[in-house]
Image (cartoon, rainbow, N blue to C red):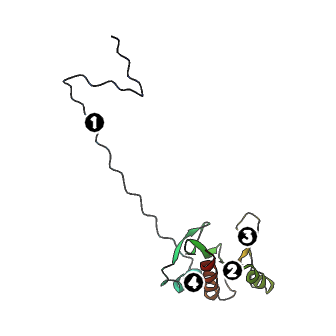
Amino acid sequence: MKKKPATAKTKAAPKAGTKTRTKPKAKAKPPAAAPPPTLDPAFAAVADAFAGDRDVTVGKMMASIGLKVRGKIFAMMVKGRFVAKLPRDRVDALVAAGDGDYFDPGHGRLMKEWIAMAPSTAPWVALAREAHRYVKTTA
């Protein structure tokens, strides 16, 4: 009787009377904790305004640090500008008044429900609250 050679699918059984040793499995290392996101100091007042809201989280998104409600972004800092999601007609009014610009995430397509504002313009906390209400009801 011929023995079949061991293959990847079938392994040869150990010879009778021999001891088999198995390598101890290496313990899996727990994943390294990500460092906490660093807030832009200009955005700190906005984040502080939502510190007591359990629905709001701070995290990294679109290469920026911002705020989310129910997992949806509603306000963030992008390249030193405050960006918030508001109803389109509200964004249109702010842009028409010269308070900001439609947000361009970098691919040349303007986002009609996102306003981008320079550091010295309009009250960010009030706009962030408005954005929070809007996103929370549409999420």
Q: State the image coordinates of residue 123 (x, y, percent, origin top left).
A: 65, 89
Answer few, some or many: residues within 10 Å of disc 3's Cα (few below 14, many 20 plus, some between 14 and 19).
some
Q: Quadrant of the C terminus?
A: bottom right
Three-letter amino acid code at disc 4? Val
The residue to which callout 1 is attached is 22
Answer few, some or many: residues within 10 Å of disc 4's Cα (few below 14, many 20 plus, some between 14 and 19).
many
Nearest to N terminus: mark 3 or mark 2: 2
- Depth check: 49 or 133 in front? 133
Q: Nearer the viewer, mark 2 or mark 4?
A: 2
The residue to which callout 2 is attached is 86
The residue to which callout 4 is attached is 46
Q: Quadrant of residue 95?
A: bottom right
- Depth check: 102 or 2 in front? 2
Separation of residues labelled 1 and 2 (CA atoms) = 61 Å
Q: State the image coordinates of residue 11 (x, y, percent, origin top left).
A: 35, 26
Three-letter amino acid code at disc 1? Thr
| Disc 4 and disc 1 in contact, CB within 8 angstroms | no
Nearest to N terminus: mark 3 or mark 1: 1
Q: Which mark is residue 104?
A: 3
- Which residue is drawn at the image coordinates 38% and 18% (left, top)? 5
Separation of residues labelled 3 and 2 (CA atoms) = 15 Å
Residue 25's place in the image compared with 14, above or below, is: below
| Image position of 46 (left or right of 107) | left
Three-letter amino acid code at disc 3? Asp
- Which residue is drawn at the image coordinates 78% and 85% (left, top)? 93
